[in-house]
Image (tube, rainbow, N blue to C red):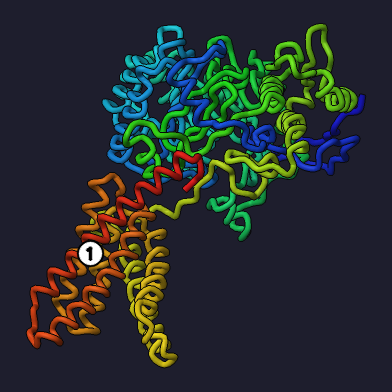
Amino acid sequence: MKKAMNTNSSLTNNGTHHYQEIKYSGAVFESRLRSHMDTYGWSQVSPTGYPKKVWLDIIKNGKSETNRRTAYIHVPFCGTLCTFCNFQRKPGTPAMAADYAQLIKKELQWYQNSAYVLQGRFEALYMGGGTPSLLPTDTLAGLINIARQILGLDESSEITIESTIHDLDEEKLRAMAQAGVTRISLGVQSFNTSIRRQLGRLSDKQTIYKTIETARDAGIKTISADILYRLPGQSVREFQNDLDCAVELNLDGISLYPLIAMTGTPLEKGLKTNKIAQLPNLSIEMEQCKMARNILITSGYKQDTSTHFIKEDDRNLYANVRLDDGDCLPIGCSAGGYLGPLVLMNAMDKQMYQVQISGGKTGYMASVNLPAKNRLLRSVTGQLQRGFLNTKTIWQNDSLEPEKILKERIDKYLDKGFLTKTTEQYELTDDGWCWSYNIAADFANIAKSENSNSSSAFAMPSSNISGNKTHPHALKYGKKKNGKGMRGFTIKDISVLGVMCALVIVVQFIFAMIFHITGIALIPGVMQFVMSFASCIILFIALKKVPKAGALSIMTAVYSMITMLLSGSILMGFGLIIGGVMGDITAKTIGGIQKTIPLIIALVIYRTSQTTFSKLYAFITEMTQVQLVWYLILFSIFASAAGAVAGGLAGIKLTKKITKAGVMA
């Protein structure tokens, strides 16, 4: 059998590494895939059946399958943002996280009396993010207790919480242990303080050691840590030091991840501008992978999944149940999971998620009912990420012939030395472990190649996620805003709204000139419609840039001041401000706060109504020769309020329909 690669390297006296050019012999892959998301080729299918009907039936009536069960809770806030990450998270505070926790409780309570939840015990709960440990101590303990009660988590269940080092103190750790947390996953990344600073981590090596000691004393049974390799300018000795520290601490679990330069992150920008040392090449990365595997196995660890090494006390239940075709109930915005044949994802945006559960859970942002063959391939990729492939224990039904479907690829990887055959199953070799995501992705793509012309509401990219393309769960946010402002707005936010409002006035003026010159202004209603439409496009952009509660108030206030300056009508400006405030209050009351769709519809109706009533006012004053000032105030406020109410209701209804249809808004 051919080896995938040969390595040759030596350490200099100062611990830096001397690398020689590596020649690949019989290499199967041109590049390395570095994320489990790269293995989602099985999700690229044409919609089958009616997913909503299927999941409602599962939730309300339970199901006949005896799948093992887990749950995932997503908390999308981080106190500080790491330079390498653009997953589904944004800057937040404990207060923001506590407010969000109320939505989580609401979703949990919706599930409480469902047949699905009452039918079977959940083996594991995983709280990820984001940074769940950002939650205030009392809020976090309360949320865990509610989840344990509703999901039937008992003493044998595993409850894991992801955390940074700096979020944890003795009080919080003890509260977590008392609430039932059995396992924490720490985002260490490196024990080297200077490297940690470069990655956006705050704590130093001594603090890491102290926190881990405190966690053990507090009663946390299992402690796992994430370690990164393939770091900019990282020597082999530095990476080996990180592994030595992890072993010295006797961590129960160690997750090793190759660094991914995700699109839009400070890390990626630094690499592009050469402000950060370039990432190690593939040969060095593979040498780091093999060295780490050798060190950890020699130190008494067992490789449990593609990225995770365990000792006896780390069951790693959540990951193993999911990879074993188990269910995962997704809870929280942007949480994804499985229920039998269904692949589900909640709305990614917090406000859309709030709408989704406001009247009892109405659906998922995306859902797909997997055909039998795709479900088999999902099971295959799960096994391969656990280091083996057993054609008798993967999910299947009577219509499938697993050996026939998988034979070509099994033979290929046996020939290349990435798989070896035992009495019971196929197992990954040392080389196979380092290429496990590539191998799993290749098996998953059996479905992709056969569904090349299909589309799916839930389709995930099956390649290049590990490169410079945006991660499918990534949502880019701007830098944390430190400028002072009002009602949560920064100076930059207010400036954006002001400029956009000024642009509305300019555009309206230009359109008015063109329409009067061309005679279009003589056609009833056309001028008002076109000017309103153009204005709303500009205001739509403003709301997309500053989608906050109160944006309509600020916008109409700025717009009013500009209008007053140009027209001299103080009363007109006053009416605009009142209308904007009423629009915000209305949107909040009907549950549509911070929603672009209802606000834009409100603006369209408001602008058209306001113009119409102004024309009516002008006609009345001309006919009666009486300046009825109160008419102006009344009509302006009425038009604004009517537009806000009608737009808000229509927008919320449309938003719910979009959500129910399983389409991302």
The residue located at (37%, 16%) in the rendering is 148
**Residue 113 appears left or right of 321:** left
Between 99 and 54, the one nearer to me in the picture: 54
Between 222 and 549, the one nearer to me in the picture: 549
Residue 466 % position (x, y): 66, 42
Residue 506 % position (x, y): 37, 81
**Residue 523 appears left or right of 229:** left
Quadrant in the rendering for residue 227: top right
Q: How many labels were placed on the picture? A: 1
Q: Examine the rendered structure and indicate whether residue 414 appears above or below residue 363.
A: above
The residue located at (49%, 44%) in the rendering is 82
Residue found at the very far bottom of the displayed protein: 517
Q: Amino acid at mark 1?
A: Ser
Quarter placement of the N terminus: top right
Mark 1 Cα shell of 10 Å, populated few (<14), some (14-19), many (≥20): many
**Residue 161 appears left or right of 297:** left
Q: Examine the rendered structure and indicate whether residue 102 appears above or below residue 215.
A: below
Q: Is residue 17 visible?
A: yes
Residue 587 % position (x, y): 27, 51
**Residue 251 appears left or right of 459:** left
Residue found at the very far right of the displayed protein: 1
Between 206 and 525, the one nearer to me in the picture: 525
Residue 181 % position (x, y): 40, 17
SS class, disc 1: helix
Q: Is residue 295 visible?
A: no
Quadrant in the rendering for residue 322: top right
Q: Examine the rendered structure and indicate whether residue 529 appears above or below residue 465.
A: below
The residue located at (40%, 47%) in the rendering is 655
Q: Examine the rendered structure and indicate whether residue 367 appears above or below residue 429.
A: below
Q: Which residue is mark 1?
A: 640
